[in-house]
Image (spheres, rainbow, N blue to C red):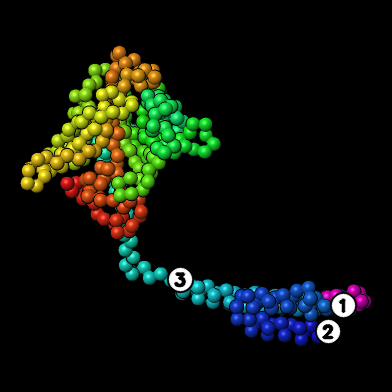
Amino acid sequence: MPALDQITSAATADIAAASSTAELEEARVRWTGRKSDLAGVGRQMKDLSPEDRKQLGQQLNEARRAIEAALATRLHELSSGELATRLAAETQDLTLPPRVVPAGRPHLLTIVERRIVDAFVGMGYRVADGPEVEDGTYVFDMLNIPPDHPARQEMDTIYIEGGEDAVLRTHTSPVQVRTMLGQQPPIAIVVPGRVYRADTVDATHSPVFTQVEGLLVAEGITMADLRGTLLSFARIIFGEDRQIRMRPSMFPFVEPGAEVDVSWGTFEGSGATRWLEILGCGMVDPLVLSMSGIDPERYSGFAFGIGVERVAMLAYGVDDIRDLYEGDIRFLETLWPREPVG
């Protein structure tokens, strides 16, 4: 076994030669660990006389203190150097101009939905919301759509597996039902949200799309109120010079029902007004009011449903509905004008 002065000399030299904190840790274990020469000297003390044990113990403590002091000194040197190197590598030049990060912007569907909702909120409507996975009672039965109606077939409606009559809502009208069940007139709500149909994707159809439906129920509401409301909406969204026309149509939960067209310039040559369909609407069927606990003898109302994608495509010249969903960066970066293109 080497003498203590030899061990101390070799240890301090090895410690001084360490070039990193990792190498220094290896040296610490090598010279002060359980298998080190220093530990071996300590194990010899049990065979010595008390007087020799005392003398060797003092020498052993001095050697240990010398090695530990060398370790502490070298650790401070190496840590300081490594910190300086790291700081130099990670230094940021704060005088450099920042990177230009393009500002985000709302999706076109978000822009159009907000404009539609804002138009009706400005007329005094409030925004209502409801679940996208709905019970068939609210999607169909309470809206005068009987069990044998074609809309309830699986080719049109997406049913949830495991649910007795749970479906992905095909319109946001269930929110209108829930509102009428929980509130007596006057009622004036708009209901934006996603809806689902078993449609095949093509240029004008998508199985997932966005609707904004509206409901007004109060005393003395007539078709004239409906027409005036929708004319105001069309002029807010499409321009002050727009006109609308209402064509008779059939929807199970309104009577009478209508489809609404908005004027869209004129045809070349003839100069006749060009009309484009934008929504469906009608007076709420008295039976629907009765099922929701509202007296149809006292109250009347109207409802309408607006396809946000349809309005976006008309107002901003989008030719393919798939552009609204595919996430093409060229489409997403488009700066959409405030005024419609038509």
Q: Nearer the viewer, residue 162 or 228?
A: 162
Q: Which residue is mark 3?
A: 90
Q: Position of residue 208 (x, y in %)?
A: 38, 43
Which residues, given as a range, are shown in magenta?
42-51
The residue drawn where x is 29% and y is 44% is 309
Label 2: which residue? Answer: 1
Left or right of residue 221: residue 72: right
Q: Which mark, residue 282?
A: none
Query: Which residue is at a point 63% across and 81% down the rendered structure image?
Result: 18
Q: CA distance from mark 3 to mark 1?
A: 51 Å
Question: What main secondary structure does the magenta stretch of the protein show?
Answer: helix
> Callout 2, which amino acid?
Met
Between label 3 and label 1, give the one nearer the viewer. Answer: 3
Question: 182 above or below 65?
Answer: above
First reached walking from the N terminus: tag 3 or tag 1? 1
Residue 278 in the image, given as x and y percentages of width and height? 24, 38
Mark 3 or mark 2: whose residue is earlier in sequence? 2
**SS under mark 3:** helix
How many angstroms separate mark 3 from mark 2 (CA)?
48 Å
* Type of amino acid under label 3: Glu
